Amino acid sequence: MHEVGIMQSALDAIRQQAVNHGATRVSRIVLRIGTLAGVDQEALRFAYEALTPGSLADGAVLEIESVPARAYCASCHTEFGAGRGFIFECPQCHAFSGEIRAGRELGIARLEFP
Amino acid sequence: MNSPAPLPATPESAPDYRIHALTGAATGSTRDLSGPLSAEINAAFAASPDGEIAVRSVDVNIPLLEKNDILAERNRGYFLGRGLTALNLVSSPGAGKTTLLERTLDEFGRQNRCAVLVGDLETDNDGIRLSRPHAPVAQITTGTVCHLDAGMIARAAQSIDLDGVRILFIENVGNLVCPASFDLGEQVRVVLLSTTEGEDKPLKYPPIFKSANLVLLTKVDVADVLGFKRDVAVENIRRIAPQAQIIQLSARTGEGMAEWYAFLQARAGRR
């Protein structure tokens, strides 16, 4: 349950961005989260509901873009989508890959200020 | 709004933020704004016939664990500069991290100076168990926090004497989920899986295994009693974490400990 801390640091970063852009509120927050980031989206939404009332993000829309995992096969040099599971088996040569090319993202992608 | 507002300098001066162009639609040069976002706003003005912009959308790309990641990189540089290798040991509670470290300090630690930072929510129990005259140990009690972060490590590392230390063990809070997201600045991440946990743990908690450099299969001495199938566990680790080296050991009987020490010796900071 570190999602509360993550959401708190997101709100801190958003507050800084709002100052930089001369805004007092944010109306939409788009997060980009990889499936391997180790962050639970439900828990993150829960933290968002708990932390935003009275803040500059009160009433803002939270959008979460999920980034599917991609891996690279060192045996046959192909990059492939890892599907739903966490076992990255190369579709070409069926070797298992531990080289992750995408899926660890955890960040704020976009903000909208009214 | 009735002022021809340039970008307000402080949030207070823009209570309900909207940008209107000057009434009478000033031409290009007078509309030009400077400062943050000026390019975007000027472009929006140009595209908006009535000179009003309702919403500004900004691509920001801010990593959410940026603070932690920066501190982690700083730790890594600090450790490298001191010529020591830091290992982050992660597992469920009760997988045998402390027992493994006790024996490691008593054997490997006699020839190679080691230090330990150990995290728990409460009590100094593990720190006390690990205390040895020849090994500096610091306990980090996190209160309610479910993982160690790079800031805790930076502070804890300052609290002990690292002179001559070749290996710094960081015993993370027992948790197979949250520590996966927090880089501490370690060079090696070690994930422990004990035979009391079941062979399918790697399939159930993939992110942490995906991030491992080394997986230790612990308590192998009781595997048979428990009906734990070591080959199945190893196969599961290989499927989830093909990048990781695997060592099977028992800190009680000593089986596999030589291989663990060889791993440490190969990775230890040179001095």
Image (tube, coloured by chain):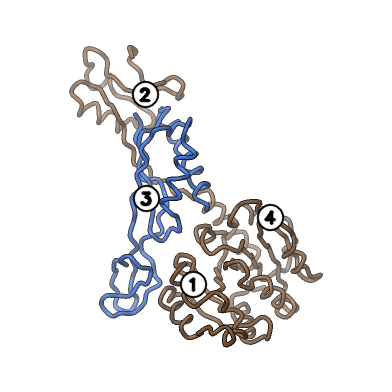
Chain colours: A blue, B brown
Give amino acid for label 4: Thr
Image location of residue A85, percent across then percent down:
35, 68
Give amino acid for label 3: Arg
For this rendering, which residue is in front, B174 or B87? B174
The secondary structure type at the circle numbered 3 is strand
Q: Are marks 2 and 1 on the same chain?
A: yes
Residue A6: image tag: none
For this rendering, which residue is in front, B271 or A40? A40
Q: Are marks 2 and 4 on the same chain?
A: yes
Image location of residue B257, percent across then percent down:
64, 83
Give amino acid for label 1: Lys
Residue B141: image tag: 4
> Circles 3 and 4: CB distance less than 8 Å?
no
In the rendered image, the quadrant that contains the C terminus of chain B is: bottom right
Q: Specify which label sits upstream in the sequence, 2 or 1.
A: 2
Mark 2 highlights which residue?
Answer: B17
Mark 3 highlights which residue?
Answer: A32
> Circles 3 and 2: CB distance less than 8 Å?
no
Q: Give the chain of mark 4.
A: B
The secondary structure type at the circle numbered 4 is strand
Foreground disc of the pair 1, 3: 1
Q: Quadrant of residue B258?
A: bottom right
> Circles 2 and 4: CB distance less than 8 Å?
no
Foreground disc of the pair 3, 4: 4
Q: CA distance from mark 4 to mark 1?
A: 27 Å
Mark 1 highlights which residue?
Answer: B201
The secondary structure type at the circle numbered 1 is helix
Give amino acid for label 2: Tyr
